[in-house]
Amino acid sequence: MITVELAKLFRRPRTYVITGLLCALPFIVAVFLATTRVPPPPGQGGAFLSAVLSNGALYPAAAMALVMPVFLPVSVAVLAGDAVAGEATAGTLRYLLVRPVGRTRLLVAKLVSLVVFVLFAIVAVLVTAYVTGLALFGSEPSAGVALPADVTSLSGVTITPAGLALRMAGTVAYIVISMLSVAAIALFLSTVTDSGLGAAMGALAVLVTSQVLATLDAAAAVRPYLPTRYWLAWIDFFRDPVLWRDIERGAGIQLVYLGALLLAAWAAFVTRDVAN
Amino acid sequence: MTTKRTEERIGPEEQAEARIKAPKQQRSKAAKEQSSKGAGAKEHSATDRAGRKGPSGEKGKSEPREHSLIVTRGLTKRYGRITAVDGVGLEVREGDRYGLLGPNGSGKTTLVRMLLGLVFATRGEIEVLGRPVPSRVREVLPQIGAMVEGPGAYGHLSGRTNLKLFDAAGPGGGRRDRMRRVDAALERVGLAGVDRRPVRAYSLGMRQRLGLAGALLRKPRLLVLDEPTNGLDPRGIREVRDLLTELNAEGTTVLLSSHLLGEINAFCTRVGVMDRGRLVLQDDLAGLRRPTGRVLVSTPAPERAVALLDGRVETRDGTTIGVRHADAAALNSELVAAGIPVTEITVERRSLEQVVLDVTSTSSDRVDA
């Protein structure tokens, strides 16, 4: 069933359209930056954006900071929201279940295919951003990569390209976990409604609410438990030394949300009447 | 029927045996019905016996449910305050061509979905191929081909790719044979020449055929088809009926649900009628369509015929009169002897339509003030 889900994912034009759009955003930003060479003022604009002007090798990290807060979660919510509800609307859900494919198995296959999509999209963004960065901003000599001053507490610290790759890998892992909890919200809603759009909308409503509350001082009491509170904690991978506190907390919260929502999705799906 | 007995019966040998036996029984049953045609009043009892003699009857076993593929008891489904299915006791026997008849909204689809484990019953028991549903439905689903409320396919993929994915999604069958299975199923439903066009470009009839191909992919022992001829033209409907007849002769039991009387009448040997969630009637078609005891005579001289037969004429419709008479042949000679020309003479039978109208209430989609 997992191979079937993957075949469906990669045979579907929308997978490539969404990934293409995700890759296009950092590319467009890079073109503007490269032509004007106007860096965003410190503390504003995307993270790393002023640093990439001097070193294109950091652009993948900048690209992540660009797609992470809005674009990537939206695409994950759309795909995950459609996962079960889309099958129900197309009338294929009942045929899969009668085939028979166990409900738990179907849900697991959907989740695996979402993980693969997130990885695929992130890798695509990283690769295009790396190529764009090197082509438009050039690279520093191979001596090492200077960590950008606007995120590192110690400016001018350099790390080896291998070190950079390792930190990027950590970043990817962290983002995948964060996106999976988005997927879990949408997947849960997808099992209780037959409207993929509704499920995606519901998941986005949760995220937007969380983002708003995260900046609201009056909501400080709940802030540590908001799903989006630590979303940008991966930037700490680019500090020297790596600041683990927020990363650990963020990953912990995401895993709790992920577990609870997947359990809810499973419970909702195995007891549900498929009667659309 | 105890669960244990049924389970014993479902072993591979018995299955194979059942498959081989079913067509023979079907033929002998058909032959009996054939031979009893036109035999006048005795016909009813003869047909009834033949009709009621299920596959188990021929084996000399007294338990009539021995070869039941689907049995439900007191099956009820409520959605909130609406009762969609109400205390249904369905019984489909091996080799049956069972027609589930009922207007839209009478609960047919919900019933079919419960049989397949898609919808969970509020109350009651279901046993399909000897296994309780939904708890062990996955053990029997591989032997069931189903089409429920219209075909479902991924619109952006071709019909062939759809079938391949569908085949790969479930258990059983090797990757190597997949192409052959898919091609064989497409061939059977008349889509052998289908090209790489995506399904969204298919006509409704083509989609319907594709759905049927999906149901046939695994050479099922039981076919459950909900409105399979929806969207097909008259020729397509005929083709599907011929295909189902062929499959049934090969031993496949068919449960067909439809709101079209003609479709059930033309194909089925056994009928269940649903009305507002209840199964109001379940019987062999031959038994339902028993003679009314009248003989219909068409004659250019109806007045003379009425005069001759006096009080025995019960109905009159233009030149056709309905005569209470036990023997059509005797009536014919009587009329001819009196010099009354007869253009047509036939034993009147209850029509399925009349049967259905008798047992159902008002049309379910009618909304009166």
Image (cartoon, coloured by chain):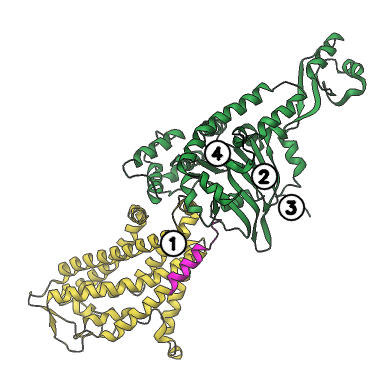
Q: Are marks 2 and 4 in contact (CB under 8 Å)?
A: no
Q: Residue at x 57, y 30 (%)?
A: B25
Measured as percent of width and height from the top left, residue B91 is found at 63, 45
Label 1 chain ID: A
Quarter the N terminus of chain A occupies? bottom left
Measured as percent of width and height from the top left, residue B336 is found at 83, 10
- Identity, as a three-letter code, of the amino acid under mark 3: Val
User: Magenta includes A269?
Assistant: yes
- Identity, as a three-letter code, of the amino acid under mark 2: Gly
- Say which mark, if any, is on residue B102: 2
Please name the residue that numbered disc 4 is placed on.
Answer: B253
CA separation in Å, label 2 and label 1:
34 Å
Q: Which residues are magenta?
A: A260-276
Q: Disc 2 or 3, which lies upstream in sequence?
A: 2
Left-right relation of B253 to A64: right
Colour that chain B carries in the picture: green
- Identity, as a three-letter code, of the amino acid under mark 4: Thr
CA separation in Å, label 2 and label 3:
17 Å
Specify whether residue B256 is in view.
no
